[in-house]
């Protein structure tokens, strides 16, 4: 797949339920309008052993085949998915989304062999902490940094806002990777998080227990009560509801 402007990113999440011996595969297809230059540094590794565990339906085989020949783009949004076997996805374009640079997947250098990667890829993941960040005088600071490996090898880097794209290139916000990110500024862009305000409009959303708007917030209480009933929680209109996402 040569230089292109319209690329489709495919993010797969696999949920494996051991007791039911089933696999649930969810494909999230994203349309990304970006102009890419020449292929940069082959392809970064990401371990996706589940690709070989699929039952082999036509849809599954088709998507895996498209990834292998580079017709789809791997869209990774956190360091946990930054290691993919190049033996599988030979020419796939890759996009990394950074939403929290503090989480980098750093481990001692000795653990590199546990990744099952060829020795020539150590240079991409290899990381040396500055002297001030080392724990003792004999600490060489050598480590493997999964996020650093992704930054070095991906075709395009995105962040959750234009401001954050700038922030991670600064000493204060770069968590040690600011110089590396600055060197890849030509492929670094920020795309602001947002929603479709027509589709996600509480004043007209038919899926809500009660509609509300900025002019009349009374419906929010009814929505809270409906959720508490659905979850079997005590009905407490004044009790705050907190939604927490585990940080990665």
Image (cartoon, rainbow, N blue to C red):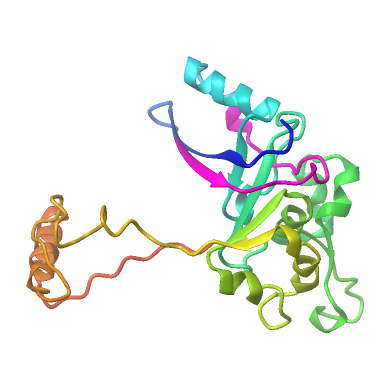
Which quadrant would the C terminus be assigned to in this image?
A: bottom right
Question: In the rendered view, does 221 fall on the left or right side of 165?
Answer: left
Image position of 8 with respect to 107: above or below: above
Q: In the image, residue 165 lies at what x, y percent? A: 63, 69
- Specify the quadrant that holds the N terminus: top right
Name the residue located 79 percent from the left edge and 80 percent from the top edge: 133
Reply yes or no: does residue 44 show up in magenta: yes
Query: Which of the pair 237/192 is nearer the observer?
Result: 192
The residue positioned 43% from the left and 26% from the top of the image is: 21
Q: Position of residue 127 (x, y in %)?
A: 83, 63
Q: Residue 53 is drawn in which quadrant? A: top right
How many tags in the picture?
A: 0
Eyeballing the image, is 144 above or below 83? Answer: below
| Camera sees residue 181 | yes
Question: Image point 68% across, 83% down: which residue?
Answer: 172
Say whether residue 217 is magenta.
Answer: no
Magenta stretch: give its range: 27-52
Q: Going 60% across and 25% down the picture, which residue do you hit?
A: 64
Q: Position of residue 95 (x, y in %)?
A: 64, 49
Residue 237 screen position, x and y as percent: 9, 73
Which one is nearer the viewer's eye here, 73 or 2?
2
Left or right, residue 103 beside residue 201: right
In front here: 103 or 193?
193
Figure quadrant of residue 135 = bottom right
Q: Judge left or right: residue 13 versus residue 95.
A: left
Q: Quadrant of residue 110?
A: bottom right
User: Would you say residue 57 is visible in this rendering?
Assistant: no
Which of the two residues, 18 or 88, is positioned nearer the viewer here?
Answer: 88
């Amino acid at each position: 797949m040569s230089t292109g402007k319209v690329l489709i990113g495919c993010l797969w999440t696999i949920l494996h339920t051991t007791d039911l011996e089933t696999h649930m595969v969810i494909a999230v297809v994203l349309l990304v309008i970006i102009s890419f230059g020449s292929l940069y540094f082959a392809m970064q590794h990401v371990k996706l052993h589940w690709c070989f565990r699929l039952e082999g339906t036509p849809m599954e085989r088709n998507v895996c085949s498209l990834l292998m020949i580079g017709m789809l783009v791997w869209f990774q949004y956190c360091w946990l998915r930054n290691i993919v076997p190049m033996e599988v996805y030979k020419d796939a374009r890759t996009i990394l989304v950074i939403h929290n640079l503090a989480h980098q997947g750093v481990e001692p250098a000795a653990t590199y062999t546990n990744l099952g990667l060829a020795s020539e890829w150590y240079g991409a993941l290899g990381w040396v902490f500055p002297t001030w960040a080392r724990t003792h005088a004999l600490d060489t600071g050598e480590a493997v940094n999964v996020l650093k490996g992704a930054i070095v090898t991906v075709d395009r880097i995105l962040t959750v806002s234009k401001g954050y794209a700038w922030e991670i290139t600064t000493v204060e916000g770069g968590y040690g990777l600011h110089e590396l990110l600055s060197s890849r500024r030509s492929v670094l862009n920020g795309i602001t998080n947002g929603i479709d305000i027509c589709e996600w409009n509480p004043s007209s959303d038919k899926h809500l227990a009660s509609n509300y708007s900025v002019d009349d917030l009374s419906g929010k209480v009814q929505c809270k009560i409906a959720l508490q009933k659905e979850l079997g929680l005590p009905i407490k209109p004044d009790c705050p509801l907190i939604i927490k996402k585990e940080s990665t």
